Amino acid sequence: MEPLLLTDIEAAVRAGWGADTTTPEHRPRWSEANPARDQCGVTALVLHDLLGGELIRGEVGVDGERVDFHWWNRLGRGVEIDLTREQFEAHEIVSGGVVIERPAEIVRLREEYELLRDRVLERLGALACEGAPDPDPVA
């Protein structure tokens, strides 16, 4: 079986995004033109499931005022993965970044997280199976 690459994980996450995995407040405005919009929390949790590391939360500011939070991941030795940073417009500035302990139970966006997680795992499972040799029919 071929090992999965980070590019495989990224492709699976991006393929899993939809209006149904974004925050409910944003759903009416979700667009394929900016599919990463409001997907950061659920994406960071799914990547944490797959890769471990730390969950990082920064602040999104507009004109110096915090308007939201942004989530991403940090792996060992300061390597950061942020698959949703492109969601922001030029006037939206992400700053800071503190480690947030993963909650024991996901309450907010639980359904959206589980939906994205299941889509990603299904796609990664299919990719892993594509590289696997066919079973020996004689054995």
Image (cartoon, rainbow, N blue to C red):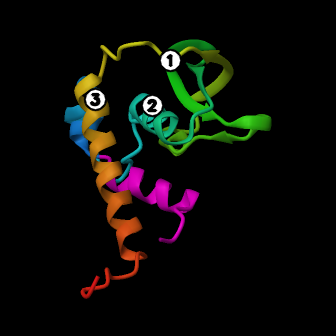
Residue 3 in magenta stretch: yes
Residue 55 x, y percent position in the rendering = 57, 25
Ranked by sequence position, the earlier of labels 1 and 3 is 3
Q: Residue at x 31, y 41 (%)?
A: 116
Query: Label 1: how many residues lie within 10 Å, few (<14), some (14-19) or many (20+)?
Result: few
How much space separates mark 1 and mark 3, taking CA atoms?
23 Å
Q: Residue at x 52, y 25 (%)?
A: 70
Q: Determine which of the numbered discs, if any, sits on residue 45 in the image.
A: 2
Residue 109 x, y percent position in the rendering = 29, 22
Q: Amino acid at mark 3?
A: His
Q: Amino acid at mark 2?
A: Leu
How much space separates mark 2 and mark 1, taking CA atoms?
8 Å
Above or below, comparing residue 26 to residue 33 in the picture:
above
Q: Secondary structure at mark 3?
A: loop
Above or below, comparing residue 98 to residue 12 in the picture:
above
Q: Determine which of the numbered discs, if any, sits on residue 26 in the image.
A: 3
Q: Secondary structure at mark 2?
A: helix
Disc nearest the viewer among 1 and 3: 1
- Which residue is under mark 1? 102
Find out whether the residues at labels 2 and 1 contact each other: C-beta distance under 8 Å. Answer: yes
Label the magenta part by its dominant secondary structure.
helix
Disc nearest the viewer among 2 and 3: 2
